[in-house]
Amino acid sequence: MSSSEPVIDVRGLGKRYDIYENPRDRLKQLIVPKLASLIGRSHSTPVYHREFWALQDISFQVRPGETLGIIGRNGGGKSTLLQILAGTLAPSLGDVTVKGRVAALLELGSGFNPDFTGRENVLLNARILGLSREQIEASYDEIVAFADIGDFIDQPVKTYSSGMFVRLAFAVQAHINASIVIIDEALAVGDVFFRQKCYARLEEIRASGAAVLLVSHAMTDIEQFCDRAILLDHGKMNFIGDATEAAKRYYQLHQTGQSFSTVPVNNNSEDIAHNAADTGDGNWSASVTLPSAHNVTQVGNGWAECLGFSVYDDCGVPCRHFSQGQTAVFVSEFRVLKDIGMATCGVVLHNERGIIVHGKSSIEHGVGTNDRIKAGTIVRCKQTISLKLQLGEYTFEIGLGAIEPDIFNRMSALTHEAIDAAVTHLCVLPKAGSLSIGWASDRSGSALSHHGIADLPGSIEFSFPKFR
Ligand SMILES: Nc1ncnc2c1ncn2[C@@H]1O[C@H](COP(=O)(O)OP(=O)(O)OP(=O)(O)O)[C@@H](O)[C@H]1O
């Protein structure tokens, strides 16, 4: 990070939208104040809208060569902030100073004319973005090579696939020698090879001294690519600082975004004895109320409901952002609504492509609840998973099932299919939540524990049988 003068300086920024309940109110707001001032009553003009502050009291600076991430939940104000920095939206309050040429990768290709060829659009676009004829000539071949769309460069862009369109638009923006590059999830498009090329190009741009602002919901991108990050929450700056810390807080915000259950936990009945492993420690204690699951979709046969769940790190702190290899602790709580056999529970992890990378139930762990379970029992499950997985975002599914005790006790004599068929799925939360896995900063040796989706148990040995 450079210590030179900031290229972006934002002080006390606020953006207000006037919200009208219907189009008639908008019209009234246009006309009535004018009429009122004509008859000298402007002091009592009625207001037909309510104010909504999309951004409030935002202040930060970005210096050359710095990459700043902007993160936050949907509606947090990220796009509004980027649009103001890109100059396409005016602030309502505060001062915004942006020095130098801005490449805004916001709506890629929005400046393209569909009837012009790719070549014509590159020339036109580069001109609009402020490049001189000589500069365009000098970078034209590089832009076309970067886009890598072959002979399509001489076809009208209306014949392009959406991927080609984005490639060409990104190529132009990435070669205009901007001093500030603003990216709003633009890198989420295109195939993975093109995305890799984009990231490599962004590294070059950053190394050349440009400031990069990146909005992303992918915390691994923020952590790997950004020095610092701003966490926006309901239009306010919740945090600004180290990108890894910002990513952690983003997940904590998600977690605390769940409302806390008001359902009393049945912790004095005999049924709670099924919680044989209730050690009373931290999150696992039956007296701790878990964040409510009532807003999360639950599917099942109606014999159980999920009351709450949470994910913790191995110190018992609520967590959705883990380091590779760290242990995640999933705690969930269900109310059983009908007499059932033994309870079974489990967690399934899916990667960004929806592929199951790990799923394991209490049956696969060989753990049972000893007895049949009566209607009204509260069942609390705790499962630990060592996250020896590829870096990235994952969703998790949690569920409760039931199996007859005699089948559970005869498991070793049964096939996997027979056991599977004997499990009744009572309540499943297919999209219970998400978590991310980032670099393990304290690893000795390689920064990555392995390549590919999973770190499978294994070992390596050397031997030197002969000296040739
Ligand atoms: N033109 C508008 N009029 C009224 N409200 C608006 C307007 N544009 C945005 N908003 C509101 O401002 C808030 C911030 O929106 P913004 O698009 O900046 O959020 P965001 O963090 O980019 O969200 P997402 O992650 O979903 O893209 C939202 O509540 C949105 O509904």
Image (cartoon, helix red, strand yellow):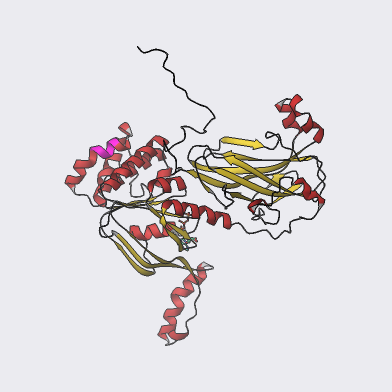
Q: Is residue 157 visible?
A: no
The one nearer the camera, 243 or 459, is: 459
Q: Position of residue 110 (x, y in %)?
A: 36, 49
Q: Position of residue 409 (x, y in %)?
A: 78, 31
Q: Residue at x 59, y 43 (%)?
A: 396
Question: Is residue 355 toward the left or the right of residue 232 in the image?
Answer: right
The one nearer the camera, 180 or 319, is: 319
> What span is colored magenta in the figure?
141-145
Question: Is residue 364 toward the left or the right of residue 406 in the image?
Answer: left
Question: Is residue 447 toward the left or the right of residue 425 in the image?
Answer: left
Q: Residue furthest bottom?
A: 40
In what quadrant of the picture does the C terminus appear? top left
Q: Is residue 86 visible?
A: yes
Q: Position of residue 377 (x, y in %)?
A: 78, 50
Magenta span: chief secondary structure: helix
Q: Residue at x 66, y 55 (%)?
A: 292
Residue 222 in the image: above or below residue 145: below
Question: Is residue 80 toward the left or the right of residue 380 in the image?
Answer: left
